[in-house]
Amino acid sequence: MKKKTIKIVILTLLIISVIDLPITAALVGQYSLGIKTNENSTSNKIEKLQLSAANTWPLNGRAISTEKNDQWYPQICSDGAGGAIITWEDERNGLHGDIYAQSVNSTGDVQWTVDGVAICTENDTQGAPQISDDGAGGAIITWNDYRSGLNYDIYAQKINSAGNTIWNVNGTEISIADDDQVIPQISSDQAGGAIITWNDYRSVSNYDIYVQKIDSTGNVKWIANGTDICTESGNQIFPQICSDGAGGAIITWEDSRGLHTDIYAQRIDSTGNVKWTANGVAISTANNTQWYTQLCSDGAGGAIITWVDYRSGTNYDIYAQRIDTTGDVKWTVDGVAISTAVDNQEIPQICSDGAGGAIITWKDYSSGSNYDIYAQRIDSTGDVKWAADGVVICMAKDNQVFPQICSDGAGGAIITWDDSRSEWNDIYAQRIDSAGNVKWMTDGVAICNATFSQRHPQIISGEDEDAIITWLDKRSWVDYDIYAQLIKELPLNGDGDEGFPFGILITVVSIVGGVAIVSIIIVFILKKRRKYEQ
């Protein structure tokens, strides 16, 4: 009898262990993405990540919109409370693209109408939306608009924190000048409104750069249809914009007034007055082509500008320049080399390092076999701070492309990208600190590796050194949808010890609970058996 009982107990415990382990593993997997000693970090701390706050964001992301047909080109800004507002081009109506938006809070709950609030559903196509926060939990969105049926114009709309559009139905006119106005970019005016710049073909001979300010109530403030920033000969295209910290903005663009494309910039103040040399200050007029410009504030009224540079005549490199609030370039003439490694470095993105400098990331073909992701930091004086030609962010197999970057709030950055190491494209991310140490798993953390393709991520800083990422997602296989995810680094105690070990706690509780339940059942069975035998 006793031997039989012991055998029953042992067998039952083995069975419950087999059942319990995968359940425990699943629970642990929901709590943390991974725990790994970071060999690349000089501090050798143990970093622990999770893909959600309070474990309420689903693995592989929260659905922002899964409406029928395609949702395209998501853009994202902060809601000021740890969440985000996301906008996109939407083809749910079938005939043409419209503009929609959705809010998601810090715990991953969508806040507005399921699948998004309509920002503009006017006739014909609206596309290429851009977004800026309004400083009050809402956002201002701008886009290309073909409602006239004759040419593209620029419109904008404000949506408040409750998901209500505030300005004219289907948007307020920013510019309806002759011919096309396209590819708007937007920056906050720091007073509840925005400053918007775009490519403008009203001259009917070449593209120029124009700009307009719209205040918090939806009134355009400067010259009707926009103030000209540059109307030089040749094309001026693809403007980028950032705040000047004083209610105005700094704009940079690609400029072909000369023999080849160069980089220029201009500042406009809060009242619509251009502040620097007419038609812009030269940022780089080096030999051959300079293109794909990006910028961020330098925190002192100026900006740091980066671009792709073909001055070598053999391959594309990455350069950068700083311009101060008065329009004086501060570093080496024609820019400081960020990376001049062999083969091509392309598509740079930039964010502030919080100390007057910047962190720049790009896709890099120096391996000679596929694109990887690299990054470099440059300080306020123009000195590059990390390894020559940049620090490796990801060198996984196949291509890593379309990097995006945001500050981590502690002098470093969080970088995300489109990654094809698996059969399909996925979304990955990596954190790099101010000293150039990558902090998470080698070659990055999987943000989304759902079935089929995830493409073109966008990223913003969250709270407590975290970030929110949004992307195009084709897990349905039928069409593209919009998803988002929060990535968070859990706090550490002392010199590298983890914070509270939730994974271990869950494991212990799960096993102890399982054993306790089995023990109770066995005791009950034995009592019944004794009673029966008596």
Image (cartoon, helix red, strand yellow):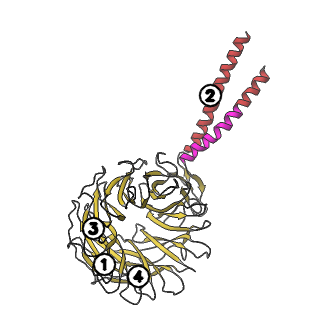
Image quarter (top left, top right, bottom left or bottom right) of the C terminus: top right
Q: CA distance from mark 3 to mark 1?
A: 16 Å
Where disc 1 sits, the SS reads loop
User: Is residue 432 visible in this depiction of the protein?
Assistant: no
Label pair 2/4, CB-CB below 8 angstroms: no
Task: Please provide percent x and percent y for residue 369.
Answer: 62, 74
Q: CA distance from mark 4 to mark 3?
A: 46 Å
Image quarter (top left, top right, bottom left or bottom right) of the N terminus: top right
Q: Please identify the quarter of the rendering in which residue 140 is found.
A: bottom left
Mark 3 packing: few (<14 Cα in 10 Å), some, or many (20+)? few
Q: Is residue 24 magenta?
A: yes
- Amino acid type, mark 4: Trp
Instruction: Tell me which numbered mark, 2 or 3, is placed earlier along the sequence.
Output: 3
Q: Is residue 18 magenta?
A: yes
Q: Which residue is mark 3?
A: 148
Task: Please provide percent x and percent y for residue 188.
Answer: 30, 64
- Amino acid type, mark 3: Ser
Where disc 3 sits, the SS reads loop
Observer-side mark, 3 or 1, equals: 3
Instruction: Tell me which numbered mark, 2 or 4, is placed earlier along the sequence.
Output: 4
Q: Which residue is mark 1?
A: 201
Mark 1 packing: few (<14 Cα in 10 Å), some, or many (20+)? many
- Amino acid type, mark 1: Tyr
Q: Which residue is mark 2?
A: 517
Instruction: Tell me which numbered mark, 3 or 1, is placed earlier along the sequence.
Output: 3
